[in-house]
Image: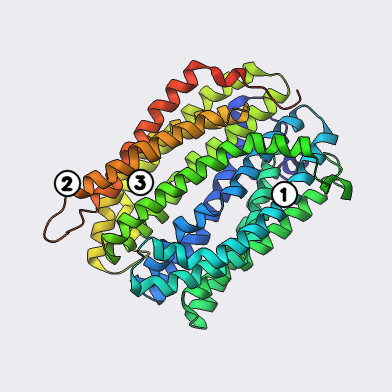
């Protein structure tokens, strides 16, 4: 009995039977730990760079983030479409289509990766200049970005392969691989940045080498899953109909990421105008925010897999029950996290910098965002349910409205209204209060769209 339970952690998990809350929790816990570990990639970079190179270097790493996110939209689309199709074909026990889906996904990822590498290397500096990145951090930010894009194919394959494993119900092995590689990233960061004095370039090389190891481990795991699929050379040949279905499902999520990234670029331009101290503050907040958001993202991803498998198995009764349980779990977890942020946020910030004024500013801004994490729990879980059922369009429109129509105008309006002698371009509150407003708006819109129930009527993948 004990041996069977242990073996379940290392194999695909059927979420169409048993307790709904138990299935969600068992799937989410490894996923949450894995997401936290993945966030450590960028966080360790920031901590090491901030402590061993300085606040300007920390700001340079932060300024590169929105550009990276914008150029990753192809991967987001492919990954989302693949995850939905994999979970539904697995739930329907269709090994042939499952194998074809995975093979086509790998080929599409390679093509997209080559495109992103070329675009990223050549467009990194022009994008940063377009955003009015301060001259004192421009060279460092450009160096960091160009190196990151040299290894972007490894990043793409890791994220998409781990997404495939999650679609198969296996959230444990991606966690194991990621923990190993996170440790590798930390060691290489210290070696390259603190030891070899390579600056932000050292942090970038450490990150892409860790991505490569993660991708190889995930691929080897999938190739060994003989009982669930038969991945062979012919599976890699692109199938027009299948690719169209992948794009149809994934494009809205890719557009959502593109919209979000474009709005972040616009807001980053505002951030850059507020000075390097605010850029560094924003970098710190976004790193802490990354950890605070992890439970929300994890429950949302778990709901997508859970709903996808149960839709594939025609178990809509479990979809309804699982969504209710997912909301209870997600909101409860977020409440605990908000309390931790309010009590211990300052100590987290001190990991990134020892500058007192920057610590104070970052702590104030983090408190502005705190309550928003509860709202985001609702958004992510209900959006995950809709995506798992095949509706990736509704979350896209909600993202469009809350980021472009609400967040960006409010950020610039608040910045304009808070101009003063000390802050001629506005107060930092404009950035974070506008983000809080967009989060709350997103939760309200998501609840309304979810209750309308149109997501239940979406055409599903070859049921």
Residue 309 image offset from top left, x and y in percent: 69, 29
CA–CA distance in space, label 3 to label 2: 32 Å
Mark 1 or 3, which is nearer the eye? 1
Q: Is residue 226 above or below residue 358?
A: above
Residue at left offset 46%, top offset 58%: 65
Q: Residues within 10 Å of mark 2 (few under 14, many from 20)?
A: few
CA–CA distance in space, label 2 to label 1: 47 Å
Look at the image and tell me whether residue 348 can be seen: no
Residue at left offset 31%, top offset 57%: 271
Residue 255 image offset from top left, x and y in percent: 53, 41
Outermost residue toward the left?
421
Nearest the eye: 348 or 435: 435
Q: Residues within 10 Å of mark 3 (few under 14, many from 20)?
A: few
First in sequence: mark 2 vs mark 1: 1
> Residue beneath label 2, please?
417
Q: Quadrant of the N terminus?
A: top right
Q: Is residue 166 above or below residue 379?
A: below
> Residue beneath label 3, please?
340
Q: Name the side, left or right, on which 1 lies relative to 123.
A: right
Residue at left offset 49%, top offset 61%: 42
Q: Quadrant of the C terminus?
A: top right
First in sequence: mark 3 vs mark 2: 3
Tell how many labels.
3
> Residue beneath label 1, please?
108
Residue 230 image offset from top left, x and y in percent: 87, 43
Q: Which secondary structure, mark 2?
A: helix
First in sequence: mark 1 vs mark 3: 1
């Amino acid at each position: 009995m004990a041996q069977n339970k242990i073996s379940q952690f290392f194999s695909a998990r059927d979420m169409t039977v048993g307790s709904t809350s138990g299935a969600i929790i068992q799937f989410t816990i490894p996923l949450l730990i894995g997401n936290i570990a993945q966030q450590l990639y960028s966080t360790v970079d920031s901590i090491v760079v901030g402590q061993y190179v300085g606040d300007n270097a920390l700001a340079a790493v932060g300024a590169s983030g929105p550009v990276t996110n914008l150029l990753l939209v192809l991967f987001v689309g492919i990954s989302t479409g693949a995850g939905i199709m994999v979970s539904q074909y697995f739930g329907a026990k269709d090994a042939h289509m499952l194998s074809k889906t995975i093979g086509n996904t790998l080929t599409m990822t390679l093509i997209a990766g080559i495109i992103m590498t070329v675009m990223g290397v050549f467009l990194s500096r022009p994008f940063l200049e377009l955003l009015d990145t301060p001259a004192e951090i421009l060279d460092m930010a450009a160096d960091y970005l160009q190196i990151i894009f040299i290894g972007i194919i490894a990043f793409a394959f890791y994220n998409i392969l781990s997404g495939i494993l999650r679609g198969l119900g296996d959230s444990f092995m991606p966690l194991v691989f990621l923990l190993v590689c996170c440790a590798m990233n930390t060691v290489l960061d210290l070696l390259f940045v603190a030891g070899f004095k390579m600056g932000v370039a050292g942090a970038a090389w450490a990150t892409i080498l860790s991505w490569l190891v993660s991708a190889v481990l995930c691929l080897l795991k999938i190739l060994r899953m003989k009982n669930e699929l038969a991945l062979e050379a012919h599976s890699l040949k692109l199938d027009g109909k299948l690719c169209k279905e992948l794009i149809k499902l994934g494009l809205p999520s890719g557009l959502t990421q593109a919209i979000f990234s474009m709005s972040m670029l616009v807001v980053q331009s505002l951030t850059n105008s507020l000075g390097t101290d605010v850029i560094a503050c924003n970098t710190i907040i976004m790193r802490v925010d990354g950890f605070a958001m992890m439970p929300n993202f994890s429950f949302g991803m778990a709901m997508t897999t859970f709903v996808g498998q149960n839709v594939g198995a025609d178990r809509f009764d479990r979809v309804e029950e699982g969504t209710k349980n997912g909301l209870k779990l997600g909101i409860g977890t977020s409440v605990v996290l908000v309390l931790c942020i309010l009590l211990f946020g300052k100590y987290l910030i001190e990991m990134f910098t020892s500058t007192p004024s920057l610590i104070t500013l970052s702590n104030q801004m983090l408190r502005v965002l705190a309550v928003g994490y509860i709202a985001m729990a609702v958004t992510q879980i209900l959006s995950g349910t809709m995506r798992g059922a095949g509706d990736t369009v509704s979350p896209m429109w909600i993202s469009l409205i809350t980021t472009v129509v609400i967040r960006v105008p409010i950020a610039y309006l608040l910045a304009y209204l808070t101009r003063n002698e000390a802050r001629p371009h506005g107060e930092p509150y404009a950035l974070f209060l506008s983000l809080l407003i967009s989060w709350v708006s997103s939760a309200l819109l998501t609840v309304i769209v979810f209750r309308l129930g149109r997501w239940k009527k979406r055409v599903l993948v070859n049921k």
